[in-house]
Amino acid sequence: MKKLPIGIQTFSTIREDNYLYVDKTGIALDLIENGTYYFLSRPRRFGKSLFVSTLQALFEGRKELFTGLAAYKRWDWNTQYPVIKLSFAGVARTVADMKQDIGNILQSNQKRLGITCKDTTDIGGCFRELIEGAYEKHQQKVVILVDEYDKLILDNLDQVEMAKEAREILKDLYTTIKDYDEFIKFAFLTGVSKFAKVSIFSGLNNLTDITLDRRYATICGYTQNDLETTFASHLKNADMGRIKEWYNGYNFLGKQVYNPFDILLFIDNSFVFNSYWFATGTPTFLIKLIKQNNYYLPYLADLWINSSLIDSFDIENIKLEPILFQSGYLSIKKVKEKKRGGYDYLLDFPNKEVRLSFHDILIDYLTDQVVEKGRYQDELYDMLENGKINDFSDILSRLFSSIPYNNYVNNTISNYEGYYAGVIYAYLASLGMDIIAEDVTNRGRIDLTIRLGGYIYIIEFKVDGDGKALQQIKSKNYHAKYQDTGEQLYLVGIDFSSTKRNISKFEWELV
């Protein structure tokens, strides 16, 4: 069997050293034949760098690397193009470090192309010299490939002023691409996020965004067919149903795909199901954003947003939803066309790995209970699976009592219904339960519905609500939609006290 290309992002290395390769060269040719300037957003570790490397080898005319691939017979190997490749890898937290990183990248291109910039400290000027010089020296238009175009910004979202500095530096660099159109054959930019057009892309408005273009939905990632063909020998006797449940589900308006990193690590670890992709980068900034804005976490389970919200965001007005989508923590579940034009998208967690891991991380940040977390999770699952409703109140009371006092200091988090609901929701979602948040009925919305082991729990939360949570369920007849299911139905009203920071009243009825 061919070796697994774990951590290898260079096309030539994969082909020369006999690593397994899922052929994306046909898609690369389609791109080149259909346009000139492209932008692609995909989550981290999704294969963007490998695709950029594939484009580079193609334009440089390295025919020997493409034997047996889709591009071999379709590409004109008689013409080679000079390639300028900007690949951002390290972390830069100051303006000086950012300029130094870009300077090093430009210097690497100068060496490879045999061109010397007059003033290497002038980033924009050096980039322009590279384009003109490459065109004149090679007598061919230039190809520009930018990998992780937004990394300098994303690495600094926790220090907004520095992120703005990064944006301006990159804006000046990328504007050159549009200004030098006459010298450019092809340009392709990749990144995790798409920033609003009024910011970094304002000087580069001729890019075609293929992020949600059905034709290129599988440009990165592995399809189900890839697993059943290219990976057939590697996945022999594996539980394909569980693999799909754990790792499939990323949807870019075409065929759903797997994150390559998950599949490669899953095979390499002898079919052990684990959170391989999620473990490579904890979304610390996202969790902080959720906590600072008292975001109502159950919304993440059934989140409808419009195309403008999913499309982009800006540093001065950071929205959680587009970041969660673009970074891969949420994916498209449904698409709904609006009567007045445009589309709405239903977002949800793409698969079991992300759902369980994301909520595990949320618990840590909301409660600081890393040690106790596992015990509460086990008790909650056992209680709900067996209908031990009286134990539910005790477990929740102990859970909130154990949350450190400093979680509440200098904020009003204990006054928000969403905080208490969010903690409970995160615990339950981390167990993989069938949960419906904001469950719609003809009389209103149920805060939380849980189905497990033949039991249905209809739950309403209140903060300082004078013990009216259960009363609201009954008065609005929320439970009517589940009365004919044949399952045991519990109505549960949970009232919290903002002063005690715990349950003030817990009521339930069996109907």
Image (tube, helix red, strand yellow):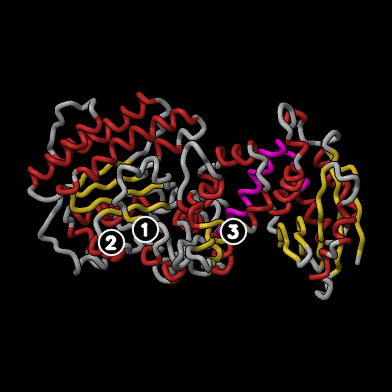
Residue type at mark 1?
Ile
Give the spatial CA distance, label 2 vs label 1.
10 Å
For this view, does 314 lie left or right of residue 206? right
Considering the whole magenta stretch, tell me its main secondary structure: helix
Identify the mark nearer the N-term, 3 or 1.
Answer: 1
Q: Are marks 2 and 1 in contact (CB under 8 Å)?
A: yes
Farthest front residue? 340
Q: Are marks 3 and 1 in contact (CB under 8 Å)?
A: no
Q: Which residues lie in the magenta part?
A: 348-376
- Can the viewer see residue 13 in this picture? no
Residue 67 belongs to the span the image colors magenta: no
Looking at the rendering, in which quadrant would you find the C terminus?
bottom right
Residue 101: where, in percent of width, then height?
32, 31
Identify the mark nearer the N-term, 2 or 1.
Answer: 2
For this view, does 479 lie left or right of residue 105? right
Residue 472 position (above or below residue 226): above
* Residue pointed to by mark 3: 304
Instruction: Give the SS element for disc 1.
Output: loop
Q: Nearer the viewer, residue 227 or 297?
A: 297
Residue at the spot x=71%, y=30% of the render?
A: 411
Q: Nearer the viewer, residue 460 or 48?
A: 460
Q: Residues within 10 Å of mark 3 (few under 14, many from 20)?
A: many
Residue 453: where, in percent of width, then height?
79, 66
Badge count = 3
Residue at the spot x=37%, y=44% of the render?
A: 148
* Residue pointed to by mark 1: 210
Instruction: Give the SS element for disc 2.
Output: helix
Residue 366 belongs to the span the image colors magenta: yes
Of circles 2 and 1, the one toward us is 1
* Residue pointed to by mark 2: 31
